[in-house]
Image (cartoon, rainbow, N blue to C red):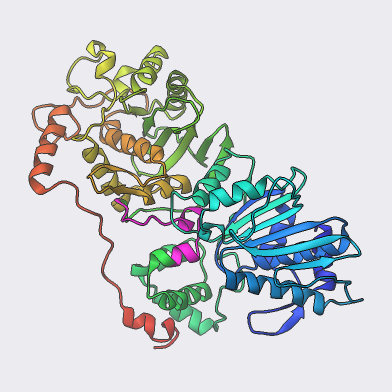
């Protein structure tokens, strides 16, 4: 525990959510924050877990124990600012032990003359911090709701030396904004800031105490429309299910809004404003999805001897903008087993990496998007002597592999072929494939059809993981035609597009059919479910 944390627990009191005065004992979220703070911290979170209260107490404690502290807490609107100031005043008024020596106590500042320290609490935009200001502690509350956050924060940060503390905390407020971009960069390890995400299920207050009989009733009547069977399978308790139902009713059963206010995973903090093409995705958060280092995640237990895998590759320029991504799926079960993403790997080196992972995963079938930097990646993949019959080609699969040129290898996306691959991926993710990457889930949630008909990520978001997964989906059926040692077990016929839809003829035929039917149709969630049951004491009666 930090010195500030020790002062909080030994001297401060707080009003709990029931309006009772009690000694300030850090809750699990506050205690974890106290342990993990780095000085440059981003904190996406569920609502009302006590993060702002922790920083108010921390900065008040710092003003009491250190000289020359200049602490600043900035909120998104005036009413919230007044609430924050009243909490600081409460800490000082109800301090255990000798009374704190306080100087000026105004509408937005409290001074501590003995320590020459000050805590300033204001509203975003109400004060501009200039070059002459020095701020030692800075907390930005509900940053995602600030007006002009990037401009305001840019000036504020110039007043904080590197030895100072800055913490930016907020629930999510859409995607593509400054807060979303900052959090995702920190989460991906692409910035000097640390990302600390706090979900709602790890917060003990977000549960309802039930008798064993009521627990059994709840668990026997799970509602699949609200995804309850999956949540329970992943460890959610009956008490948490009831708490969730209560909050869902308060939010008019808006699952998207609930996920934003009370996220389970980091991607749920940031909800796209439009409708995602991938509204229904089989996602399973598991500790078996392990970070192996070097930008690679692998599902424990893979690769399996004798199993067949399909790999999708989305190259990039390797200049720090877009990620180059390799997605790997178990061809038989459709389970995501590995993901590699790096924004600084050059396209030829990516080809070497794809060959390395392909061999690791039992001579997997590899589909590379051949647009832009794709030919460079494919050329390197071929130079690595990776079997050409295990590299996707848009040309007829019946042609001799040794006759294929570089430009024939890979899957080329276009206005006509992109809907085919994305449609294939949508069907698989909705019905049979399972993903474990929260980053892929996040990209899927922000992949939309734009007003001009373009299928791509929402503005300010990425889709590299999605496109790599779509490439893996395009190669899935062909992957199943090969045994684990890479030998062909069946020759694709090219005369029947209906039977072999991933040949060039099949794609053209599918495009013609798709055009006649009006293009891609949206995914639809199941409309089944008994809302009356939810309204009946949230499932604890009857």
- Residue 406: horizontal and vertical position, in percent? 29, 14
Instruction: In the rendered view, tell whether residue 334 sits above or below residue 529.
Output: above
Q: Quarter of the image containing the N terminus?
A: bottom right
The image quadrant of residue 13 is bottom right
The image quadrant of residue 275 is bottom left
In front: 38, or 284? 38
Q: Quarter of the image containing the C terminus?
A: bottom left
Instruction: In the rendered view, tell whether residue 275 sits above or below residue 387.
Output: below
Q: Is residue 227 visible?
A: no
- Residue 150: horizontal and vertical position, in percent? 54, 49
Task: Tell me the magenta residue range.
Answer: 258-277
Is residue 394 found left or right of 49 in the rendered image? left
Q: Residue at position x 37%, y 41% from top?
A: 466
In front: 211, or 466? 466
Q: Residue at position x 42%, y 32% from top?
A: 326
- Residue 197: horizontal and vertical position, in percent? 58, 55
Q: Is residue 249 visible?
A: yes
**Is 261 in the magenta?**
yes
In front: 34, or 192? 192
Is residue 463 found left or right of 302 in the rendered image? left
The image quadrant of residue 535 is bottom left
- Residue 312: horizontal and vertical position, in percent? 36, 32
* Overall secondary structure of the magenta section: loop
Instruction: In the rendered view, tell whether residue 285 sits above or below residue 416.
Output: below
Instruction: In the rendered view, tell whether residue 423 sits above or below residue 62.
Output: above
> Which residue is outermost to the bottom?
542
């Amino acid at each position: 525990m930090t010195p500030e944390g020790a002062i909080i627990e030994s001297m401060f009191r707080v009003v709990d959510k029931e309006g009772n005065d009690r000694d300030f004992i850090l809750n699990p979220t506050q205690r974890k924050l106290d342990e993990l703070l780095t000085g440059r911290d981003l904190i996406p979170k569920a609502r009302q877990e006590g993060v702002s209260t922790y920083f108010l107490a921390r900065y008040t404690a710092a003003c009491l124990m250190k000289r020359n502290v200049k602490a600043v807490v900035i909120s998104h609107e005036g009413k919230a600012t007044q609430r924050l100031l009243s909490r600081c005043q409460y800490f000082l008024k109800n301090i255990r032990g000798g009374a704190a020596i306080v100087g000026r106590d105004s509408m937005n500042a409290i001074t501590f003359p003995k320590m020459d320290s000050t805590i300033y609490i204001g509203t975003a935009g109400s004060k501009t911090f200039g070059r002459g200001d020095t701020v030692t502690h800075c907390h930005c509350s509900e940053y995602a709701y600030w007006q002009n956050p990037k401009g305001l924060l840019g000036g504020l940060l110039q007043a904080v030396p590197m030895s100072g503390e800055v913490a930016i905390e907020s629930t999510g407020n859409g995607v593509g904004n400054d807060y979303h971009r900052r959090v995702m960069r920190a989460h991906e390890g692409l910035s000097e800031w640390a990302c600390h995400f706090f979900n709602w299920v790890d917060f003990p207050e977000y549960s309802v105490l039930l008798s064993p009989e009521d627990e059994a009733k709840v668990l026997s009547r799970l509602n699949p429309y609200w995804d309850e069977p999956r949540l329970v399978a992943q460890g959610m308790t009956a008490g948490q299910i009831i708490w969730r139902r209560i909050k869902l009713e308060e939010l008019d059963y808006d699952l998207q809004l609930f996920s934003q206010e009370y996220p389970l995973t980091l991607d749920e903090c940031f909800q796209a404003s439009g409708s995602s093409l991938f509204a229904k995705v089989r996602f399973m958060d598991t500790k078996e999805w392990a970070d192996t280092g070097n930008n690679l995640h692998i599902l424990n237990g893979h690769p399996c001897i004798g199993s067949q895998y399909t790999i999708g590759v989305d190259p990039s320029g390797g200049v720090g903008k877009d990620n180059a991504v390799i997605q790997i799926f178990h061809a038989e079960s459709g389970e995501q087993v590995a993901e590699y993403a790096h924004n600084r790997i050059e396209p030829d080196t990516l080809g070497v990496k794809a060959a390395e992972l392909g061999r690791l995963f039992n001579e997997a079938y590899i589909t590379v998007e051949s647009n832009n930097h794709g030919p460079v990646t494919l050329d390197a993949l071929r130079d690595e002597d990776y079997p050409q019959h295990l590299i996707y080609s848009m040309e007829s699969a019946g042609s001799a592999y040794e006759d294929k040129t570089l430009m024939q290898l890979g899957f080329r996306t276009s206005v006509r072929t992109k809907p085919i691959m994305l449609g294939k991926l949508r069907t698989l993710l909705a019905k049979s494939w399972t993903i474990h990457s929260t980053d892929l889930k996040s990209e899927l949630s922000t992949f939309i059809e734009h007003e001009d008909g373009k299928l791509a990520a929402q503005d300010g978001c990425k889709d590299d993981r999605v496109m790599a997964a779509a490439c893996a989906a395009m190669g899935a059926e062909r992957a199943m035609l090969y045994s684990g040692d890479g030998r062909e077990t069946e020759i694709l016929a090219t005369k029947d597009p209906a039977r072999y839809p991933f040949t060039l003829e099949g794609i053209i035929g599918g495009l013609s059919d798709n055009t006649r039917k009006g293009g891609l149709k949206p995914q639809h969630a199941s409309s089944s479910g008994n809302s009356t049951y939810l309204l009946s004491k949230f499932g604890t009666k009857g």
